[in-house]
Image (spheres, rainbow, N blue to C red):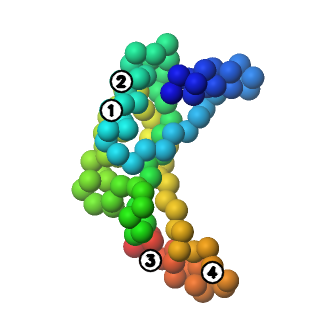
């Protein structure tokens, strides 16, 4: 994370903005680790941008869309060091889709 912090500073200088780097989290231990790191870093006064990875059914990565996921989102929202920018999901089962009807079905299933 120190390298990410340094990259963030360089991006901020090069782009004349805050050098946003978005991190992806899906586990409360990751949030605890980030908060500990950020609280002890030179960027302690700045929130880091995170997206919450949501499991879309294949159980490879991401938090579940139930109380566990809501709890994780709430933990990020309540963090003085993290800024929840949104949710991220990956529908790996959509790779071989070749028509709009199949894609619409997958989107609806994942949304519901």
Disc 3 secondary structure class: helix
Return the residue at label 1: 32
Image check: 25 left or right of 67? right
Residue lying furthest top: 42
Q: Quadrant of residue 39?
A: top left
Q: CA distance from mark 2 to mark 4?
A: 42 Å
Rendering coords of residue 87 (x, y %): 47, 52
Is the Cβ of the residue at disc 2 closer than 8 Å to that at disc 4? Answer: no
Residue at the right extreme, as displayed: 14
Q: Residues within 10 Å of mark 1 (few under 14, many from 20)?
A: some
Which quadrant of the figure has residue 55? Answer: bottom left
On the image, numbered disc 2 is attached to which residue?
36
Disc 4 target residue: 97
What's the distance in space between the residues labelled 3 and 2, CA to CA? 37 Å
In space, the residues marked 3 and 1 are separated at their CA atoms by 32 Å
Horizontal and vertical percent position of residue 51? 48, 45
Chain-order first, disc 2 or disc 4: 2
Q: Say if mark 2 contacts mark 1, CB within 8 Å.
A: yes
Picture mark count? 4
Find residue 62 and report its horizontal and vertical position in percent. Answer: 40, 55
Q: Is residue 78 visible?
A: yes
Instruction: Please rate how many residues cluster around mark 2, counting C-alpha atoms within 10 Å: few if below 14, some from 14 to 19, many from 20.
Output: few
Image mark for residue 109:
3
Quarter of the image where the C terminus is located: bottom left
Badge 4 marks a residue whose secondary structure is loop
Tell me which residue sits at (44%, 52%) in the image.
53
Q: Earlier in the sequence, mark 1 or mark 4?
A: 1
């Amino acid at each position: 994370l120190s390298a990410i912090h340094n990259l963030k500073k360089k991006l901020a200088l090069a782009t004349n903005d805050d050098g946003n780097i978005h991190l992806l989290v899906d586990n409360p231990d990751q949030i605890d680790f980030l908060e500990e790191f950020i609280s002890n870093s030179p960027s302690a006064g700045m929130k880091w941008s995170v997206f919450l990875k949501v499991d879309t059914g294949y159980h490879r990565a991401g938090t579940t869309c139930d109380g566990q996921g809501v709890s994780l989102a709430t933990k990020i929202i309540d963090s003085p060091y993290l800024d929840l920018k949104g949710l991220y999901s990956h529908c790996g089962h959509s790779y071989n889709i070749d028509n709009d009807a199949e894609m619409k079905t997958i989107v609806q299933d994942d949304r519901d």
